Image (cartoon, helix red, strand yellow):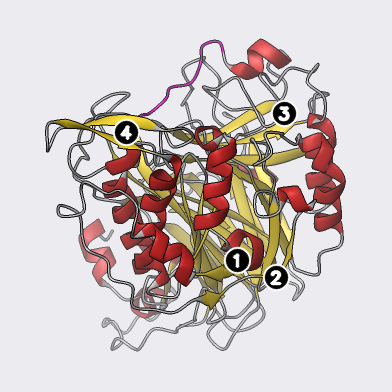
Amino acid sequence: MLNRRRFLKLSATALAAASAGCLSGKLPAEKKLPESKLPSENAWRFGIIADTQWEADDNGFNPASCAVEILNAVYAEFIKHNVEFAFHMGDMTDDGKDPFAVYNRATEKYDVYGPADAMGIVARYTQQLYNRGIGFFPLRGNHENSEICALEFRNFFPQTQNGIHNSTEAQRAAYAVFNPDAKRLPDIKRTSKPFSMGTNFSSPSDDLKGFSYSFDHKNVRFVIPDIFTLPDGTKRTIRSQQDWITDRLKTRETEHAIVLTHKGLLTQRNRDCIFGAETSKTTPGQDEFITSLSQNGVRYLICGHDHMYDRSHVYTHDGGSAKVTQIIAGSDSSKFYIPRVPSNDETYSEGRRQKLISQELFAISYIIVTVDGEHVTFDYYSSPCYTGDTIVNTPYLNFSRQDTFGYSLNGRNFLVPYGAEYSVTELTSAGGTTAKILGGINGNEGKDLSGRRFNVEVCTGFYPKDGATAGDILTLTGMDYTLGSGFTDIFTLSMTYDSGSPVLAGLNEKGQWQNAVDFSSGGVGQFIRGAWKPEYPLGTYGIDTSSKTVWAVINTNGFFAPVNF
């Protein structure tokens, strides 16, 4: 039996050949591993940054109650990930809706700001995105909920009306606002001209133009409804905008649609939602909104406001006729929230409207979304913040990927409760490749603070076969429920193949195919010629020529395919 270290040093080619019966006594010379380009060359990305309020005193690096240090750090990550644009989920500053004063610890005096200063500070440091041709689409939050802040939002971010980013007039104004920390923060020079990003812009009415807005980018339509105070002092409810929301979703010509709001549907800490002060069944409009999203192919509602990362299914009030996956984007501010006990779902809906999937508290974070044709993949990155519910200085930030999930138009997602078998997962591609999970049980014992179990959502889809594979390529994510681990429960994956004598392979970070068991943590590395049996341990893999299937006992996710080495 090969030990783990020796096993991983062997190439997939050598393993396959040795275990398939090359009995010459020597392993064959190592060959170049087959390669596939995934995601494809047409894939594109956008980023999501959550609330950037700075509630503490200004430490000399976070002016106008905006967490500029965190903003800059996340923007650097967006640049590294080569995003095409970024969404800000609202609450860009803590006090920006009215004139306010903040104590500056660096100068030991109070600084007085207005809403123009608050919006202008955000626009000024967003210049680093504009300089690289990266668009910026902000939302308003409850901390921008005033008439004057509405005017300044439009002034500094005209792109929400027409898609023109890096406006000369807006950025000139941004660099003119009061900034007592300018000497201590990076000086970002304006090195680019205005540019256009986004098409087919729409708003429900003239008074909502640039606040509630929708646009297309490549193969995705985005819909962003706003519920906060307008320049004339009025507000518009989601119900009053529902016809526009449904029309934008129903009439789109894009493959995908994503809806973004500052407040959520049913969050973990805040009782208020996009429909009002609470999410009870007496609050009208919720079921109509969820049903509209569900019927028009919207898988995800992305929101901020709750200052934590959380992913869950939220259902209509009957508990099942329609649902959407709600993603709370995290916190990029000086404060962090914890879930209520009992949960808002238990308080308002007897616990029937929400199924938890994933959650992280006390972390600074961002999300990268990759859109690749039929496939949409979310990667959640975070850096831990161990100081409790508030911080007064920005901690050292070391971001790492914690959660990966998504959906494919040609695949299916399977919600697996604790203790249930993953064998419910089975699907066949358009090209005829069938993928099944044959064994494995959801062992996620995690609960939230109110005692609710977390589920596992198995996310699947297919890429077409290429010259390196003997069948279509499975994308499998969502099973690694321990955040940041990259590993899953032990399960057996089986795939049919077209020809040859392949093994089940996984794709490494270099785009090379290796034996799928190479990527597992632990295991025996033993080849079996024949059908899988439940007693086979981690690291066992084989081929069943009678059913033309290859299989492997693994504990990781990724891209998988039958490959002839």
Residue 3: give x, y in percent of width and height.
Answer: 23, 57
Q: Is residue 346 magenta?
A: no
Distance in Å between CA atoms under marks 3 and 1: 39 Å
What residue did someone put label 3 on? 275
What residue occupies the far left of the structure in this picture?
Answer: 107
Q: In the rendered view, would you say 391 is above or below 152?
A: above
What residue did someone put label 2 on? 433
Disc ID at residue 334: 4
Q: In the rendered view, would you say 9 is above or below 109?
A: below
Q: Is residue 117 left or right of residue 439?
A: left
Q: Mark 3 or mark 2, which is nearer to you? A: 3
Distance in Å between CA atoms under marks 2 and 1: 9 Å
What residue did someone put label 1 on? 474
Disc ID at residue 13: none
Q: Amino acid at mark 1?
A: Leu
Residue 442 visible in this rendered orientation of the protein: no
| Quarter of the image with the N terminus in it | bottom left
Q: Mark 1 or mark 4, which is nearer to you? A: 4
Q: Which residues are magenta?
A: 334-342
Distance in Å between CA atoms under marks 3 and 2: 44 Å
Labels 2 and 4: the sequence-earlier one:
4
Distance in Å between CA atoms under marks 3 and 4: 26 Å
Q: Amino acid at mark 4?
A: Ser
Labels 2 and 1: the sequence-earlier one:
2
Q: Mark 2 or mark 4, which is nearer to you? A: 4
Residue 424: give x, y in percent of width and height.
Answer: 69, 44
Q: Are marks 3 and 2 in contact (CB under 8 Å)?
A: no
Label 3 packing within 10 angstroms: few (<14), some (14-19), many (20+) = many
Q: In the rendered view, would you say 76 is above or below 111?
A: below
Label 2 packing within 10 angstroms: few (<14), some (14-19), many (20+) = many
